Image (cartoon, rainbow, N blue to C red):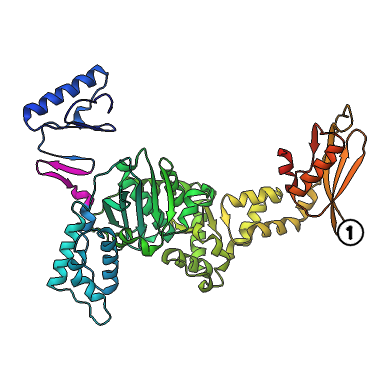
Amino acid sequence: MSQMLEGIPGTICHMDDILIWGSTQEEHDQRLTEVCKRLKNSGMTLNAKKCIFSQTSIKFLGHIIDGQGIHPDAVKIAAIENYQPPTNKKELKQLLGMANYLARCVPNYSDILFPLTSMLSNKMTFVWEAPQEAAFQKMKKILSSDPMLMIFDPGKETTVTTDASSYGLGATICQKQADGRRSVIAYASRTLTPTESRYAQIEKEALAVAWGREKFRDYLTGMHFKIETDHKPLIPMFSKKNLDNLTPLLQRIKLRMMKFSYTIVHIPGKELFAADAFSRNPQKVPYKREELEAEIDAFIQMITSSLPASSRRLDELRVAQLKDETCQKLTDYVLKGWPSKKEVDTLCAPYWQNRYEISVRDELLMKGCRIIIPKSHQAEVLNQIQEGHLGITKCRARARCSVYWPGISKVIEEKIKSCTACIQESSNRHQPLIPTSFPERPWEVLGLDLFKYKNSWYLLISDYYSRCPEIARLDRLTSAEIINHCKSIFSCHRIPDVVRSDNGSQFDPVKTV
């Protein structure tokens, strides 16, 4: 598109957005006519509903452009303009941390903030009077004006920072400038809905990442960008973990993120100033159900409705979980946050390593897509799993589809091994020996294996043609040691065409030599 319109003055093209301007109406119309001619000759069409003509002020690439110049879009700075004054020293520290990070290059900024920074002293009592309010308003004006907000450049390194508190989400999009400093492109924040406020903390942090990406999708589509978060468990979730090991909500969020190219990194909370401050002081805007929330709710509903249990059975498990002490403590940890490992109740200690997979969905305590079974129902569920006497492997697979409690795999094994019917039904099937064709010459096919004799390891090489063995004592049980002895023995005879082993880990590098 840019190449097609190249050479036309007063024309800018960004992907499929075209901006045409002129100093007079006549100049504007001439340039517009030339653009339309080139589009027509190239066989391209325009959507009339998306076209705006002869405007004195227009929104383009997140900025308002008019006769006075370029101004930041009100949507981009709403999070700053709606930021509420702090009510105590803790909130003041959060505010100043964000301000110092975003406006460190503003001249005389320390003088502007002096009425606020002076209250951080232990000798000063927190007060909010006219000087503090004036400094606060001036700070917001600086943060929401140029050059604090820069025009987006798709060729520069782009970073999205996100954070979630117990009641809000915050995000910023920044770009690295030529001098190495970061410049803000836009801010965003919002409060959590009643449903979202009951999410586990890792789910809130993941929601902040997905919401920030959705908020800035016009900037991020089609480019690689970096995401910064202060919640370390999100890193493996978005980069390594399989979908089956995640809660339904995290599954849907990860699926939504797959259409973007990004790298997610961990940043300590003390360095994530802006997003952290916005998440703790979100915009109090009227609630409007978003596409992301509706899609997540629909996906979770689909997962819970597909559980292999009737509605009556699910209601029984809900009641049982409410009465179970362990389930109640787990629910409390999920909603309020997990303490450190040393402070976890002994009843919940077995769940610690899977804490980020546990969530509450539709009033059911779940690990991923599996229902956590309270102790009172474990024996009954175990009997249902074993129905049909399918064996250990198939019973474990059945459990992995729907139910969980710590040690369930071992319990299933013990149950089946002690079941008379399972013992009678099971039979050890002996696999027949697979014959090999006799080689045509010596040292055409060899067999390799290791054995231990009197505390020493040995390498055994046997020729399939002559049955002649070669034995070498190993000083170290390593691949390098085996390779050296193989080279020595092969040099005395010949290099074989085929070498067979039991696929031991020590033989893996030997295959490539």
Task: Judge whether residue 434 can be spotted in this image.
Answer: no
Q: Can residue 85 be spotted in the picture? A: yes
- Is residue 467 shown above or below 123? above
Give the residue type at disc 1.
Answer: Lys
Q: Is residue 75 magenta?
A: yes
Of the pair 330 and 15, the residue shown nearer to us: 15
Q: Is mark 1 on a helix, strand or loop?
A: loop
> Can you identify the residue that label 1 sits on?
454
The x and y percentages for residue 366 are 50, 57
Name the residue at the top extreme: 41
Q: Which of 319 and 89 is in front in this view?
A: 89
Q: Residue at x 77, y 53 (%)?
A: 477
Residue range in magenta is 62-76
Relative height, residue 90 to residue 378 (above, below): below
Q: Residue 485 lies in what quarter of the image?
A: top right
Q: In which quarter of the image is the C terminus?
A: top right
Residue 277: x %, y % from top left: 30, 62
At horizontal 77% and vertical 44% (from top left) the residue drawn is 483
Q: Residue 495 vs residue 392: left or right? A: right
